[in-house]
Image (cartoon, rainbow, N blue to C red):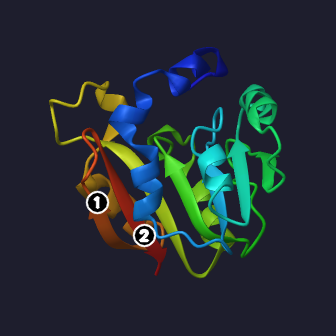
């Protein structure tokens, strides 16, 4: 998504539909964790994560998104902003207990390279969590190119060195899918 459409990321009905606090509750975060919000956009999840964990690394490929996020940080001192590239996750090796990608995986221009960087960034036992619109559900009113099926995610991430752990289907339109490096 272009920064020109960033207002959609903070739309009034997003909390009700995407239930960000329930999503984060389901991740079983601990205060000592370092979590990367890859494709952070305007910081919808970053700001919530900053209240729950020790360190948040927020990445985005668009400097304009990072500037919007920087303006929203307020007094949060535990958030690090990093500009990623189309072919670079830009995360330090073994930095993260968890990498969160909300409505991002389907947008990647080079999934094998980006996911390899994310795999390097995970600490042993670290988790990759994707939140994606359910592609199997025609009632989900999102363009098909912005949806993914669970089978697609398992196949693609399995081929990129990750093992499927679980899919949480509690949200009205999206699923929360957890993987670990295999």
- The spot of residue 86 in percent (x, y) is 67, 41
Q: Which residue is mark 1?
A: 168
- The spot of residue 29 in percent (x, y) is 54, 69
Q: Secondary structure at mark 1?
A: strand
Q: Which residue is mark 2?
A: 179
Q: Residue furthest bottom?
A: 124
Q: Where 111 falls versus 123 (above or below)?
A: above
Which tag, 1 or 2, sits closer to the chain's start? Answer: 1
In this rendering, position of residue 71 left or right of residue 147 = right
Q: Secondary structure at mark 2?
A: strand
**Of residues 181 and 43, which is closer to you in this image?**
43
The residue located at (36%, 60%) in the rendering is 177
Q: Residues within 10 Å of mark 1 (few under 14, many from 20)?
A: few
The residue located at (38%, 69%) in the rendering is 158
**Of residues 96 and 160, which is closer to you in this image?**
96
* Image quadrant where residue 16 sits: top left
In this rendering, position of residue 155 left or right of residue 111 = left
Q: Residues within 10 Å of mark 2 (few under 14, many from 20)?
A: many
Q: Where 42 falls versus 19 (above or below)?
A: above
Point out the frontmost of discs 1 and 2: 1
């Amino acid at each position: 998504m272009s920064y020109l459409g960033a207002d959609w990321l903070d739309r009034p009905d997003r909390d009700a539909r995407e239930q960000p606090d329930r999503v984060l509750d389901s991740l079983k975060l601990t205060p000592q964790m370092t979590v990367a919000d890859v494709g952070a956009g305007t910081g919808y999840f970053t700001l919530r994560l900053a209240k729950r964990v020790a360190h948040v690394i927020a990445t985005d490929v668009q400097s304009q998104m990072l500037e919007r996020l920087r303006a929203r940080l307020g007094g949060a001192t535990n958030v690090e902003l990093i500009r990623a590239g189309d072919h670079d996750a830009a995360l330090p090796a073994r930095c993260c207990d968890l990498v969160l990608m909300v409505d991002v995986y389907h947008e990647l221009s080079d999934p094998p390279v980006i996911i390899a960087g994310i795999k390097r960034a995970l600490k042993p036992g670290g988790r990759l969590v994707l939140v994606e619109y359910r592609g199997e559900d025609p009632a989900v009113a999102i363009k098909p190119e912005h949806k993914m099926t669970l089978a697609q995610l398992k196949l693609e991430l399995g081929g990129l060195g990750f093992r499927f752990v679980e899919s949480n289907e509690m949200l009205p339109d999206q699923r929360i899918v957890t993987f670990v490096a295999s």
